[in-house]
Image (cartoon, rainbow, N blue to C red):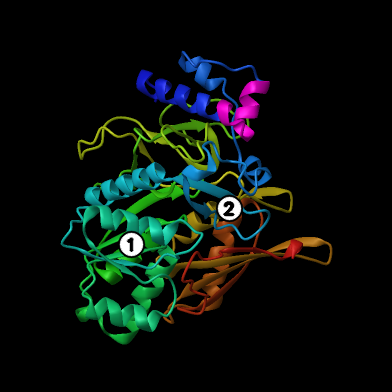
């Protein structure tokens, strides 16, 4: 999906804004001697920007407009290293709200819906993004934020919430709590707008079935507005990206070269109209692909596939490169297992050890199941893990994002 002439014009406006502001990327452009961007090849010659660039610009080195035009800041949700501070102008906030409103509309959500918002508020972009779009749509926002599951459920019942906005981890936790309490008949939910973490088909199916709702994957990251730059439609064949605001490329994470539509690689995003902190060719580390052709829904907006993982979430164990998705795919072949798992990596007696904890119901032999899983994982990754089967519900649930990989070698 090549960048078009309108998008090139918008990139040139961004390039001028960045060089005039002399922020970190403006300096990069000057050092590279880059002027007007006239062709697709000119665009591909633009340097990438990365998370470390944004950290190095802390606290307000990303600003590309005078400070008096900044109305808000947000920060990425990462817990390690220097935080990334993203400044927003009033137009940025409005644009983000329009994109989010578009997401709700694609999901068939209207101003008659009551939208139960559980993602966090504050510096994180989540809760306030869902609310901004909700208000633009004219729907009723129920701004719960995370936590206090008892209160969440009582408000969900009393307010007759029809839409749940949540991480997949918290949506699953709520589904399990509703089943445990036997209150499914009191819940009026019809749709779920779910995002912020990668989740497998097994987890998706469980949430759909247990809550009895349609589910829509929402995409976004703090550095590029926040959630709401794209969403799946009812056909569930990828997420439509609003390419009048954001241009998407897929690159080979090792070489940085652009990949053809249909091939898996790293998502790279360029903000086309953002004012406060424009980003050019930002490497997200998310792994996906551009889905070729037009969607059955008729939308002309390009699609990326569900996020398959991150180029930086690889684990090196016993000299073997392992991705969490590989383990998840193996576990998904066992219908007796739940969608929840945890991987713990440790270094004992001079060697690396991988332990995989999985959940099942009480109808199977735990030891036999552990052996089957270990054997199948070995056939996929080349070495045998220690597998521990536990009862359903024993692994930790999260109100935010679940931590599925714990590397104790570096703790």
Q: In which quarter of the view is residue 33 placed?
A: top right
Residue 32 locus on image (x, y percent): 65, 20
Task: In the rendered view, tell whether residue 395 sits above or below residue 308.
Answer: below
Alpha carbon of mark 1 to alpha carbon of mark 2: how far?
A: 26 Å
Question: Taking 319 as reference, is 357 left or right?
Answer: left
Question: Taking 19 as reference, is 331 left or right?
Answer: left
Q: Is residue 127 visible?
A: yes
94, 175: nearer the viewer: 94
Task: In the rendered view, tell whether residue 353 sits above or below residue 25.
Answer: below
Label 2: element kind: helix
Q: Main secondary structure of the magenta part?
A: helix
Tag 1 residue: 205
Q: Which residue shows up at 56% across the image and 16% down it? A: 35
Q: Is residue 141 magenta-colored?
A: no
- Give the magenta part as a residue range: 19-31
Q: In which quarter of the view is residue 377 placed?
A: bottom right
**If the image is split into quadrants, where does the N terminus sit?**
top left
Tag 2 residue: 379
Question: Taking 251 as reference, is 80 left or right?
Answer: right
Q: Nearer the viewer, mark 1 or mark 2?
A: 1
**Circle 2 Cα neighbour tier, 10 Å, few/some/many (<14 / 14–19 / ≥20):** few
390, 257: nearer the viewer: 257
**If the image is split into quadrants, where does the C terminus sit?**
bottom right
Residue 126's disc is none
Task: In the rendered view, tell whether residue 13 sits above or below residue 357.
Answer: above
Task: In the rendered view, tell whether residue 136 sits above or below residue 371.
Answer: above
**Circle 1 Cα neighbour tier, 10 Å, few/some/many (<14 / 14–19 / ≥20):** few
Residue 281 locus on image (x, y percent): 53, 32
Most distant residue in the left direction: 112
Residue 180 locus on image (x, y percent): 34, 84
């Amino acid at each position: 999906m090549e960048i078009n002439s309108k998008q090139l014009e918008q990139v040139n406006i961004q390039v001028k804004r960045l060089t005039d502001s002399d922020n970190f990327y403006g300096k990069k452009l000057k050092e590279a001697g880059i002027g007007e961007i006239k062709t697709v090849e000119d665009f591909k010659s633009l340097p990438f920007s990365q998370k470390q660039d944004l950290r190095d610009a802390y606290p307000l080195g990303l600003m590309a407009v005078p400070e008096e035009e900044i109305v808000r800041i947000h920060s990425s949700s990462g817990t390690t290293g220097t935080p990334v501070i993203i400044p927003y102008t009033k137009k940025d906030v409005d644009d983000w709200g329009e994109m989010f409103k578009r997401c709700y509309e694609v999901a068939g959500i209207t101003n008659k819906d009551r939208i139960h918002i559980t993602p966090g508020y504050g510096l994180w972009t989540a809760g306030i993004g869902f609310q901004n779009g909700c208000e633009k749509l004219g729907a009723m926002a129920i701004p719960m934020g995370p936590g206090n599951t008892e209160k969440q459920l009582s408000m969900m019942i009393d307010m007759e919430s029809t839409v749940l906005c949540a991480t997949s981890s918290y949506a699953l936790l709520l589904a399990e709590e509703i089943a445990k309490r036997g209150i499914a008949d009191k819940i009026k939910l019809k749709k779920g707008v779910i995002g912020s973490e990668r989740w497998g088909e097994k987890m998706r199916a469980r949430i759909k079935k247990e809550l009895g709702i349609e589910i829509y994957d929402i995409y976004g990251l703090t550095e590029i507005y926040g959630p709401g730059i794209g969403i799946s439609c009812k056909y569930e064949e990828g997420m439509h990206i609003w390419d009048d605001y954001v241009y998407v490329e897929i690159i080979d994470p090792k070489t940085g070269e652009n990949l053809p539509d249909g091939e898996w690689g790293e998502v790279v995003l360029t903000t086309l109209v953002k004012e406060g902190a424009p980003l050019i060719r930002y490497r997200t580390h998310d792994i996906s692909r551009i889905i070729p052709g037009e969607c059955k829904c008729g939308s002309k907006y390009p699609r990326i596939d569900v996020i398959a993982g991150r180029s930086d979430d690889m684990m090196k164990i016993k000299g073997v490169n392992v991705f969490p998705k590989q383990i998840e795919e193996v576990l998904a072949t066992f219908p007796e297992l739940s969608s929840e798992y945890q991987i713990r990596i440790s270094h004992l007696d001079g060697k690396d050890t991988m332990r995989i904890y999985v959940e099942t119901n009480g109808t199977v032999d735990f030891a036999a199941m552990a052996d089957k899983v270990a054997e199948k994982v070995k056939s996929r990754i080349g070495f045998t893990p220690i597998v521990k089967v536990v009862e359903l519900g024993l692994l930790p649930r999260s109100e935010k994002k679940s931590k599925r990989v714990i590397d104790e070698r570096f703790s």
